[in-house]
Amino acid sequence: MSKRLGVPVRPILESGLAVVIGIIVGAFLMLAFGYDPIRAYAALFIGAFGSPAGILESLAFAVPLMATAITFAVGVRAALFNIGAEGQMYLGAIGAIIVGSAMLLPAGIHPIAATLFAMLLGAFWALPAALLKIWRGVHEVVSTIMLNWIAFWLVSFLIRTYFAEPGRAERAMPALPTARYPILGETLTAIVFFVVGVCILVTILLWRTGVGLELRLVGDNPEAAKYAGASRSRAILVSFGVGGLAAGLAGASQVLGRPPSWTIYGTLGNLLNLGFDGIGVALIGRNHPIGGIFAAIFYGGLVHGGRFMEYNVGVASELVDAINGIIVIALAAPEVIAIIRRRRES
Amino acid sequence: MKTPTRLQWYLIGIALTAVLMYIIALSGFSVAHLIETGLLAMTPLALAAVGECLNEQAGTVNVGMEGIFLITAVLGVYWAEIFQDGLYGLLLGSATGALIGLLLGAVCVYGKANQVIAGMGLNIMALGLGPYMLMSIWAFPGIHVFPRELMFPPIHFSLGDGYFGLSPVTIAAIVIAILAYLLLKRTLLGIRIRAAGENPVAVDVAGVSVYKVRLLMCVIGGALAGLGGAFMPLGWFGGVVKEISAGRGFIALAAVVFAGLDPLLALVAAFIFGFSEGVAFTVAVSPGVKEIVPYFFVQMIPYAVTLLVLTAAIGGKRFPRALGRPYIRE
């Protein structure tokens, strides 16, 4: 049945089961510190999805995660663990400020130009990891994390010096009104269409083009890929390049498409962890850009609802990140899911 | 290009350090102070890296050391405050690390997980759990400073007209590195560990459980990373912040790759990376320098050094054949 409808039932069930595991362990973490998990989760889910405003806000939180999920997903498709979305996303955000805040352009072109420049900077920051992998075999897990931290300090420097808002030490120059995407409701802006468009484009690239076929072949079976004449170097470059473009877009979305700030805070507080959260979102979405859209909406809801949980019940909203991590661990181990399924069936 | 042998690495390391010291002394910094800071920064890296060498020798990769650092740093301080003693903080922090290692090991070994993804899951979990625990325990966001009496302080030796502080944990880290080396090279368990990473089927046929050997190494690796994590606030900073691990778990991972899973070389790598961090710390606060080089760029030094050293030194190393692959018993 699942084949005929074209809906991948089994992966959805597995992701669902991992999410349930995450939520249950999260409840135990709340009990361990003396909170009431039922009240906390009620506040979270009603806050996130209980009203039209909540849903719009959850979608706004989902937008950057859809993009950073692509970064990790495209990496995994080529058997790479690109966990550099975080740093590439910082670079994208500063790219959006360079064009969106510090340059004057006509209204129609401005947001597009700023978005494209942000994406290019994101890809630029992914390049060293790709080249080091190809030339020297440096493992991308280590190189991308080092680049993340260098990016953190570089962008911190830039937003407090050249791109600081005069008289407001706590943040960088906001995007000019001409560079802002129109608001659709709450803090959701039209950049959501751009991001969803990119998700669709990446899906087409991966499953409908020769480049995508090569990338997936190198990821699935490097030996066979070699005999088929696929270029591993090209697959790595494409994977990191597309991932960097997507991460840059995530950074741009927080500057050009996120009221009320339209900028980066001095601590990078409105950017922190969007890249790492994208890893969890990608895995829940089964490393598929379209699956990532739905996973991002779910996770965006957790993040937005987490604020209600903190405000109403006093549970620190960071717990949501912990739940995300547990979901990732559950999804990493096929046997964990399989064991539970066997239990249920027997 | 031929990769240098271990002896050559030591000589290169000593020569480079000597040149660096000379330059540092010429620019008017205290060499003793720099080494002091460098050794403090080395300690958590060395502990985690040595543990990870053992872990990877047996065939399991743990990229979640960053997460273990963060969780045990917070809980180490918590235990120290409960028992009113820094030593308890270190020991129970290490025990917490062992428990996390056990859980992650169970997921990787018995759950046949993708080890990199499971480890990243641990890191993401810690990213949330760290601040969550800080908030839940001390009801203050992102930072906690504990009373000075709870520190596990360095021992001070007099040196010229000043003194030189050396933490007992640093000495322990060096001793542990040597013991780990001997364990791998001179004992039956060491042979089993290496065989579990190289040829798990042979270990199984010989009647030794691959799962148990690997799980044991996960626990030891976790315990050492946990000691390193608890050391950061209790033996070094005097407080805990939500970014306390600051990529050190991954720098330790870089040290392991650099060392080709040799615990003694991992110690050297940890010193190089720790020393670069010590230099960064010292330079960042030096008058005359801090006005010229922005603080932000000084902060990049440890990460840039790690990336450069790893790029220059990689290659020619052999890693266990079954590394990173779950063992599935026929």
Image (cartoon, coloured by chain):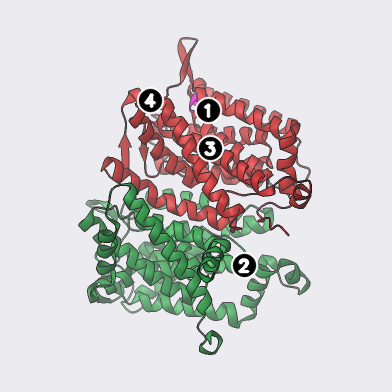
Chain drawn red in the picture: B
* Residue A262 within the segment the image draws in magenta: no
Do marks 1 and 3 both belong to one polypeptide chain? yes
Mark 3: amino acid? Ala
Identify the main secondary structure in magenta: helix
Q: Nearer the viewer, mark 2 or mark 3?
A: 3
* Residue that appears at 52% across and 49% down: B103
Q: Position of residue A258 (x, y in %)?
A: 30, 67
The amino acid pointed to by label 2 is Ala
How far across and down, in percent of the image, does residue B146 sit? Answer: 32, 31
Q: CA distance from mark 1 to mark 3?
A: 20 Å
* Helix, strand or loop under label 1: helix
Horizontal side of residue B242 vs A177, given as left or right: right
User: In the image, is residue A33 above or below residue A281?
Assistant: above
Element at badge 4?
A: loop
Give percent across and percent down for residue B237.
40, 31
Q: Which residue is mark 4?
A: B85
Question: Where does label 3 land, which residue?
Answer: B223
Discs 4 and 1 share one subunit: yes
Left-right relation of B152 to B113: left
Task: Report the residue at 40% width, 73% height from top.
Answer: A113
Task: Say which residue label 1 marks.
Answer: B39
Reading the image, the residue beneath label 2 is A78
The kind of residue tagged 1 is: Leu
Callouts 4 and 3 on one subunit: yes
Callout 2: SS: loop
> What segment carries the magenta color?
B34-38
Which of the two discs, 1 and 3, labels the residue nearer the N terminus? 1
Q: Is residue B37 magenta?
A: yes
Identified by mark 4, the residue type is Asp
* Figure quadrant of residue A49: bottom left
User: Local crowd at mark 3 within 10 Å, few (<14), some, or many (≥20)?
Assistant: many
